[in-house]
Amino acid sequence: MTTAHVDPLVARMRPFGTTIFAEMSALAVRTGAVNLGQGFPDTDGPPEMLAAAAEALRTGQNQYPPGPGIPALRAAVAAHQRRFWGLEYDPDGEIVVTAGATEAIAAAILGLCEPRDEVVCFEPYYDSYAASIALAGAVRRPVTLRPGPDGRYAFDPDALRAAFGPRTRLVLLNSPHNPTGKVFTADELALVAELCREHDAYAVTDEVYEHLVFTDAASGHVPLATLAGMRERTLRISSAGKTFSCTGWKVGWVSGPAALVSAVLRVKQFLTFVNAAPLQPAVAVALGLGDDYFTAFRDGMRARRDQLVAGLTDAGFEVLTPEGTYFVTADVAPLGGRDGVEFCRSLPERCGVVAVPTQVFYDDPEAGRRLIRFAFCKRPEVLTEAVARLRRLGTAR
């Protein structure tokens, strides 16, 4: 067989085809369905941020920014983390700006993992995690999150302990968690920290939904890096996309001890080199907005969550109420569904709504076979229309 007839893609990446988000979004365009699949808002971010971006575009801030990011944004990230989480990071050496959280995750894994190193992660997981681990030649050690009788996702502590071993290099933690909406509890975070210290492992924490915790406004989000002994071994990742409704800007950042951040930067420079020069000063402005912005943002998303949860329940789904993020998970069994992929592929034709099947985010697809994910980061009138369409599923049975 000639090379013309062989897939030229390296073997480790062949399991990764077109993402489920691209497939479902294309289906939404083709059918004119309401797209509650991909997690992007349908409104723009704060006007102060948009004005700052326009000003930067007009005033010549369009060339390469410094490799770690412009000083104003790094300083704003440091001030933001001190203000909200009590974490101290030096803007010069402990923070690097990336092309969104996705690049940050890839650069962290590529920078820290040798081939055959093991990465502990929680399934279901955002799809770039598995791809980044494969690119590094590392090995996934998934721990399954399962919904309990109370509707909360949790993991078996013994399964987490068993996932750690002599080849464990790092744990990849996402809280608030996509796609389940889970917020890891204090006890769960304490166990992750204990195992990292015991096995001398690093932690890479994806915290892009840090301002979207709905369960306990008093304590809110708790970064793993705030726990004893964890700041020095944790790379903390966040981005502007989710908090400021600008997912297309792809401006993220990594914070951590200088040696770990340097590892990320040395990989990042050969991925994108730099990114988003005129958008970086605008994100710096957004990070400095008053508490009223962040409170209103959280409360508005919580109201949309409640609207969609009520609507999905009324339409006949068994709904798992999320504690954070943009997303609601629902079981399709009450509507006669047995497989989430099949259900989602047929949903646009059946009622004109797009969702995402959760099973594609598992190493063990049976654990999420009947679960699908809806995004509620849309205008209330869009959610109202989507719910009206979904009710047709119940009446059609």
Image: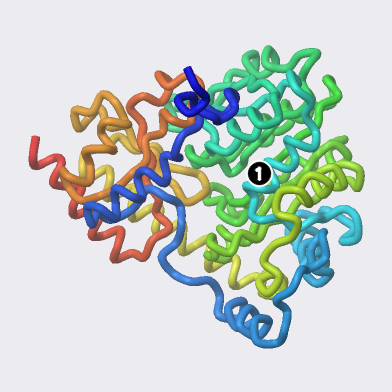
Q: Position of residue 199 (x, y in %)?
A: 83, 20
Which residue is found at the position 53% from the left and 68% from the top? 296
The colour scheme applied to this rendered structure is rainbow
Which residue is found at the position 68% from the left and 24% from the top? 120
- 24 or 203: nearer the eye? 24
Q: Position of residue 299 (x, y in %)?
A: 49, 62
Mark 1 residue type: Asp
Q: Label 1: how many residues lie within 10 Å, few (<14), some (14-19) or many (20+)?
A: many
Q: Position of residue 367 (x, y in %)?
A: 43, 21
Q: Quadrant of the C terminus?
A: top left
Q: Does any portion of residue 68 appear in the rendered image?
A: yes
Picture layout, residue 214 above or below residue 333: below
Q: Which residue is mark 1?
A: 206
Exactly how many numbered labels are in the figure? Answer: 1
Picture layout, residue 200 above or below residue 29: above
377 horizontally vs 277: left or right:
left
88 horizontally vs 83: left or right:
right
272 horizontally vs 300: left or right:
right
Which residue is found at the position 67% from the left and 21% from the top? 139
Q: Does any portion of residue 220 appear in the rendered image?
A: no
In the image, farthest residue toward the front: 2
Q: Quadrant of residue 122?
A: top right
Which residue is found at the position 56% from the left and 40% from the top? 177
Q: Position of residue 279 (x, y in %)?
A: 66, 71
